[in-house]
Image (spheres, helix red, strand yellow):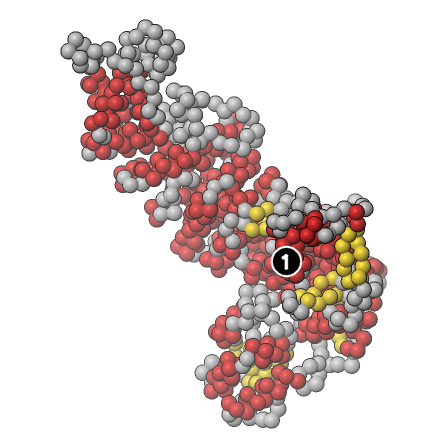
């Protein structure tokens, strides 16, 4: 501590303890002032440093006849004992930034940090002391308030001076002894706080209890190896015991932090999950769901996830409340009569934190941190989704399921959970069909059977599906079984794939006019002028739902706003760049225009668009639209109304029917809870990114082939030499779709089987099983010629 600063603090100390001697003193920081509240020497020592920091008023000192300052007896001895005071005195009941800085300065001067270690250990290991520390009003009062004035949940603000806490941590982290003291104090503190939260309802009694976690989470070293073993796991377990009201406040507080601080907290919890998962072994006997550290870290990461959403660009409005589903019946279902209602309940349990925050992942337009950064791949490698699904659907009250924290799972893992849900519903419908049929003496039909003609596929499919949706919609939950009239194919999945492909080719044919096609974006949009009835659009929705339900990939090209609308949001201006880029650019130029909008643009609230035959159609965005000019003042309203008309109102009839068909199949699925719109698109359409190197590493061989067989080496050399279009044709030929499944081609279970020796026959495939039947051709050239012919001209079943 510099000599001049030390002398100044000594003068403040004397002023606070003995005063200036002036009976008329009006300095509120002087003991001679009549309104001054006396302080003991411990409090005065702390206060002296605080006053020095803020350059508080200092009284003029009386001087002796020699002109030197009067020094009261024992002043230097009193102040030089401050360091000893902090070593031995139990009177430091809380910390402020100034207190810490003073102790550090004194310890640095003496070269002994034992006083600092004792104070840190005492305060950071005591819940009540930590609650009172680093208050925002630390300068304005000599003592912090003991209780909180607000009721639980009444204020989202906290009484902690967060900037002050961060500066203190920054100072302490340069001192090795202090870091050890913080670590040991945290290990001692957290078990006691956990018990308080679990049994004493301490937060309800004093909402300032949240200060503990606000302060502790500002420690920038929580992710270091020393903390990962014990201290951080205990902190996570303790934090997860906070009531929902406290967690809500914490989320909202963190949402106001800047990006580096939110990312640091996210990485801290992610590092704990990864460290724990890779350092332990899991099995059917010991599931990762039962690891308290991983579970607690995921629950804490959930707080950061929602803070990340709240801190970004959020749209909690523009919701479409119409779910298109049927109303719940008061009658008992057969599942309820059989005691299976938990397994077949319609939706996931309500997320209380999400409900309190009033925000959902679907509401996020642009989070602070990309959602992909919250996925933990190490965790995805060890979670067993069949068990996790059971916990999610049946034992949610007693077991933890990672599907309650879906942000930590990748799309492939979540798709496994959706697969189990779909399959159980299929088996359920089979069971119910058998029971009903036995009771009524009828032959059961456990599948959703569709028999169609290739040249009348839309008519046949539409009639059959329309009948099913009207008579018994639950049949749509059965496993799909398609038969092409006059063909030999038995549907083990491959026939269904081609059925979907042919239906979509027909429906999206521009000549039919159900959808419009944009040559620039290569995307389809609902034709607002279509002459087709709603049943056709319902069929398209059913087809998309059946594709997800039966784990098939479709060649569908919709803008992202379609999937957002399917999940309950309405289209907004932010969706236009993807769906209608030309219109978006025009409206954006209108919003950015600096000139006279009314005179230069000459626009009104009456707009024009082309109908099915290209003729202009006028539409009023509001009453007396043609008489209302667009000006600088109302242009935002014009843009909002225009966007709403294009994306919502103009296609309401078509989209409502489309969504109704989609929900006929998926209304009871957890899809809406688990997946974001971009992930739903991936479920339906697969990925356009084709990594054949990853496929080569995972493919299996049978019939005498192996990766070292010469024909296999020639095969992969040939395939890698193909262009993008030829590779897609090969994928279509082998699997029934030219898209990669969720997770990429590395997740595709493909097998190459030896199909005889050298021959003139073409390679064949079983798309049901993703199996390629490859003869052992005599040369690489012949292999390439035969393979290209097969993938170029193949179509249909039973025509080998």
Q: Residue 314, relative to residue 1: is it above or below?
A: below
Which residue appears at 37% of the width and 8% of the height?
A: 34
Asked whether, in this view, residue 170 is left or right of residue 375, the answer is left
Which residue appears at 58% of the width and 69% of the height?
A: 688
Asked if residue 328 shows in the view, the reply is no
Asked if residue 414 shows in the view, the reply is yes
Residue found farthest to the top: 23
Q: Position of residue 584 (x, y in %)?
A: 65, 57
Q: Quadrant of the C terminus?
A: bottom right
Q: Residues within 10 Å of mark 1 (few under 14, many from 20)?
A: few
Asked whether, in this view, residue 645 is left or right of residue 51, the answer is right
Residue found farthest to the left: 66
Which residue appears at 22% of the width and 26% of the height?
A: 4
Asked whether, in this view, residue 127 is left or right of residue 62, the answer is right
Q: Position of residue 642 (x, y in %)?
A: 72, 52
Using the image as rendered, state which of residue 90 and residue 317 is in the foreground: 317
Using the image as rendered, state which of residue 696 and residue 650 is in the foreground: 650
Q: Secondary structure at mark 1?
A: helix
Q: Position of residue 787 (x, y in %)?
A: 58, 86
Q: Quadrant of residue 75?
A: top left
Q: Which residue is mark 1?
A: 585
Q: Residue 243, relative to residue 431: is it above or below?
A: above
Asked whether, in this view, residue 64 is left or right of residue 342, the answer is left
Using the image as rendered, state which of residue 435 and residue 647 is in the foreground: 647
Using the image as rendered, state which of residue 171 and residue 302 is in the foreground: 171
Q: Position of residue 297 (x, y in %)?
A: 47, 46
Q: Quadrant of the N terminus?
A: top left
Which residue appears at 60% of the width and 71% of the height?
A: 739
């Amino acid at each position: 501590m510099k000599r001049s600063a030390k002398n100044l603090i000594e003068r403040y100390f004397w002023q606070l303890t003995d005063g200036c001697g002036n009976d008329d003193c009006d300095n509120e920081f002087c003991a001679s002032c009549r309104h001054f509240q006396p302080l003991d020497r411990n409090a005065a020592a702390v206060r002296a440093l605080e006053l020095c920091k803020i350059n508080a008023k200092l009284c003029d000192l009386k001087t002796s006849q020699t002109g030197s300052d009067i020094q009261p007896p024992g002043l230097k001895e009193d102040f030089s004992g401050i360091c000893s005071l902090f070593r031995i005195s139990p009177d430091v009941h809380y910390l402020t930034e100034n207190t810490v800085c003073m102790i550090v300065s004194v310890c640095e001067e003496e070269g002994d940090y034992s006083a600092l270690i004792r104070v840190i250990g005492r305060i950071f290991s005591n819940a009540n002391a930590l609650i009172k520390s680093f208050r925002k009003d630390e300068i304005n009062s000599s003592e912090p308030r003991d209780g909180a004035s607000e009721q639980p949940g009444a204020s989202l603000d906290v009484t902690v001076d967060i900037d002050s806490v961060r500066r203190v941590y920054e100072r302490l982290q340069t001192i090795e002894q202090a870091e050890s003291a913080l670590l040991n104090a945290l290990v001692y503190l957290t078990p006691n706080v956990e018990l308080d939260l679990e049994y004493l309802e301490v937060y309800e009694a004093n909402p300032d209890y949240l200060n503990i976690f606000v302060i502790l989470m500002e420690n920038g070293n929580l992710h270091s190896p020393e903390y990962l073993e014990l201290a951080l796991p205990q902190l996570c377990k303790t934090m997860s015991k906070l009531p929902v009201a406290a967690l809500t406040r914490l989320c909202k507080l963190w949402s106001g932090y800047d990006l580096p601080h939110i990312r640091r907290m996210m990485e801290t919890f992610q590092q704990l999950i990864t460290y724990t998962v890779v350092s332990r072994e899991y099995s059917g006997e010991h599931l990762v769901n039962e690891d308290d550290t991983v579970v607690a870290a995921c629950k804490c990461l959930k707080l950061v996830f929602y803070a990340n959403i709240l801190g970004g660009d959020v749209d909690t409005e523009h919701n479409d409340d119409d779910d298109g589903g049927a109303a719940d019946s008061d009658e008992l279902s057969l599942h309820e009569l059989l005691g299976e209602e938990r397994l077949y309940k319609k939706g996931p349990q309500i997320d209380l934190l999400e409900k309190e925050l009033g925000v959902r992942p679907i509401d996020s337009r642009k989070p602070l941190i990309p959602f992909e950064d919250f996925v933990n791949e190490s965790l995805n490698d060890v979670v067993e989704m069949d068990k996790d699904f059971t916990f999610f659907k049946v034992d949610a009250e007693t077991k933890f399921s990672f599907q309650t924290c879906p942000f930590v799972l990748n799309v492939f893992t979540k798709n496994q959970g959706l697969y189990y849900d779909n399959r159980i519903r299929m088996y359920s419908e089979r069971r119910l069909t058998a029971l009903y049929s036995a009771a009524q003496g009828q032959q059961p039909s456990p599948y959703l059977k569709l028999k169609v003609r290739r040249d009348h596929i839309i008519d046949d499919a539409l009639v059959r599906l329309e009948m099913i949706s009207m008579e018994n919609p639950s049949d749509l939950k059965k496993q799909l079984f398609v038969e092409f009239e006059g063909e030999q194919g038995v549907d083990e999945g491959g026939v269904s794939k081609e059925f979907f492909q042919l239906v979509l080719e027909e429906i999206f044919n521009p000549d039919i006019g159900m959808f419009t096609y944009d040559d620039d974006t290569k995307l389809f949009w609902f034709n607002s002028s279509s002459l087709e009835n709603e049943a056709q659009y319902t069929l398209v929705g059913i087809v998309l739902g059946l594709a997800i339900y039966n784990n098939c990939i479709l060649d569908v090209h919709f803008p992202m706003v379609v999937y957002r609308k399917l999940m309950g949001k309405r289209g907004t201006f932010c969706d236009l760049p993807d769906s209608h880029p030309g219109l978006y650019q025009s409206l954006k130029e209108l919003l950015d225009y600096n000139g006279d909008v009314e005179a230069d643009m000459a626009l009104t609230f009456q707009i024009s668009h082309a109908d099915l035959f290209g003729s202009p159609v006028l539409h009023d965005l509001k009453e007396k639209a043609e008489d209302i000019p667009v000006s600088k003042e109302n242009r935002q309203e014009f843009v909002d109304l225009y966007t709403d008309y294009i994306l919502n109102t103009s296609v309401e009839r078509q989209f409502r029917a489309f969504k109704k068909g989609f929900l006929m199949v998926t209304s009871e699925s957890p899809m809406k809870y688990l997946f974001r719109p971009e992930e739903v698109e991936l479920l339906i359409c697969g990925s356009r990114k084709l990594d054949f190197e990853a496929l080569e590493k995972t493919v299996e061989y049978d019939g005498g082939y192996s990766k070292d067989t010469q024909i296999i080496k020639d095969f992969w050399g040939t395939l890698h030499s193909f262009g993008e279009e030829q590779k897609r044709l090969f994928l279509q030929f082998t699997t029934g779709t030219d898209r990669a499944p969720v997770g990429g081609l590395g997740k595709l279970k493909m097998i190459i089987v030896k199909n005889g020796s050298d021959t003139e026959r073409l390679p064949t495939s079983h798309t049901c099983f993703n199996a390629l039947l490859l003869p052992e051709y005599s040369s690489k050239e012949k292999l390439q010629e035969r393979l290209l012919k097969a993938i170029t001209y193949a179509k249909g079943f039973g025509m080998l």
